[in-house]
Amino acid sequence: MMPKCMVFFAMAFSVPLAEAADFHKTYDRASSGFITIFTWNGDIKLSGYDGRNVEVTAVKKGPDRDLVEIQDDSFGNHVHLFSKYLDFGRNNATVDYEVRVPKEIFYNQIYLKSNSGTITVKGVAGSLRLETVGRAIEVRDVEGMLMASSVSGDVKGYLKQTTYRSVLRFASISGNISVQAPPDLSAQVHLESASGRLKTDFPLEAKETRYGSGKFAFGKLGAGNQVLDIRSVSGAVTLSKKQAEGAGKAAK
């Protein structure tokens, strides 16, 4: 594996990582705050839970694992973590982060970035910015302001039923984007792919751009209380209806 490094706002949630952790810390964050995690090469997993503190666990891997440090610049209500490589000529190391945060808190800002690792987020509310270069992003059951973007990786979103006025944006340059939403989705929707396939189960008419081979679709679904924006330059864009739990079994 390649290296994982920079972390800006941190949180952790998995027992397997904690057992072999190179870094494990609990932050007292009973109120909203800021979380930044920046890693050069490594996965970042973030989830909401029923506790009251922010928990962060990190594990270093690879032959050069001793040449990377987990730098903690946290202060006040800011959790700020960064994977610092001591010798960029020897960077065959990764740093994986797992973070969990109190799910009842609406966070002022969460910024997670990995140049060559995957990012997964589940059950979190607030202003979220997620970035990768060559790997995938997966988002489940989030609310608030979301910007999830990958340069060449796929982006997946699984939306829950909500009345919160969320603004959710998914973007990739060359990766595919697929989003599943409740059948009664209420949102202002914009879908676009400059040169890839565009498909949706919702009553949105796909049209071709005036020039080139691009496709787009937009419209209001239900009361339109959310904004859902999905765009890829050369990848496929799909907005599908999420099947109700147990529906697949009942149909068999």
Image (tube, rainbow, N blue to C red):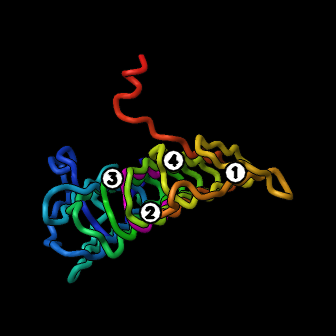
Residue 234, label in figure: 1
Residue occupying image coordinates x 68% and y 53%:
217
In magenta stretch: residue 139: yes
Identify the residue at the far right of this view. 211
Q: Is residue 144 above or below residue 134?
A: below
Instruction: State the residue in front, 250 or 124.
Output: 250
Dot 1 falls on a residue whose secondary structure is: loop
Residue sitting at x 29%, y 69%? 106
Task: Give the residue drawn at x 63%, y 57%.
Answer: 219
Disc 2 versus disc 4: nearer the observer: 4
Question: Residue 13: x, y in percent?
Answer: 22, 53
Secondary structure found at label 3: strand
Q: What residue type is labelled 4?
A: Val
Question: What stretch of residues is rendered in magenta?
Answer: 137-148
Residue to which mark 4 is pinned: 179
Image spot of residue 124 (x, y percent) = 31, 60
Label whose residue precedes the other's in the sequence (3 or 4): 3
